[in-house]
Image (spheres, helix red, strand yellow):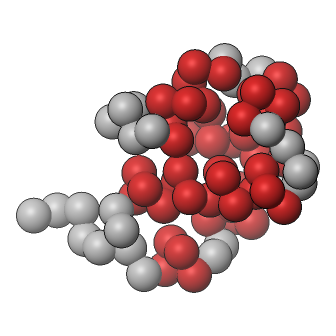
Amino acid sequence: MNTKEAVAARIKELCEQKNLTINGIANLSGVPPMTVYSMLNQKSQNPGIVNIKKLCDGFGITLGEFFGTELFDSLEQEIK
């Protein structure tokens, strides 16, 4: 799994945990729904830390809580 896939998986996981739709978290966080969808579909080459922070605010969590999962500890190396 690469970083973009891990970010998408974590957003989906948090939406499930918080019982939110993609549009719901977009509205709570102020990130346009199309931006969130592009992050989930990995069309976005770089999801951007500012957008991830806004999503975290919408979820009511910190960046540390977003990234502090085993999902991010076992990522493949990005430099090839």
Q: Which residue appears at 45% of the width and 39% of the height?
A: 41
Q: Is residue 80 left or right of residue 55?
A: left
Name of the residue lying farthest toward the left: 80
Determine whether 71 is above or below 61 in the image: below
Determine whether 45 is above or below 72 in the image: above
Q: Which residue appears at 25% of the width and 71% of the height?
A: 77
Determine whether 50 is above or below 5 in the image: above
User: Which quadrant of the rendered structure holds the C terminus?
Assistant: bottom left
Q: Which residue appears at 60% of the width and 31% of the height?
A: 36
Residue 79: tell me if it is visible: yes
Q: Is residue 31 left or right of residue 45?
A: right
Task: Pinpoint residue 5: horizontal percent, then vertical percent.
Answer: 43, 56
How many badges with numbers are in the image?
Answer: 0
Residue 48: tell me if it is visible: no
Task: Pinpoint residue 62: horizontal percent, then vertical percent.
Answer: 79, 56
User: Which quadrant of the rendered structure holds the N terminus?
Assistant: bottom left
Q: Is residue 39 left or right of residue 45?
A: right
Task: Pinpoint residue 8: horizontal percent, then vertical percent.
Answer: 53, 50
Q: Quadrant of residue 54?
A: top right
Determine whether 28 is above or below 2 in the image: above
Q: Quadrant of residue 49?
A: top right
The answer to which of 67 and 5 lies nearer the viewer is 5
Q: Which residue appears at 63% of the width and 76% of the height?
A: 69
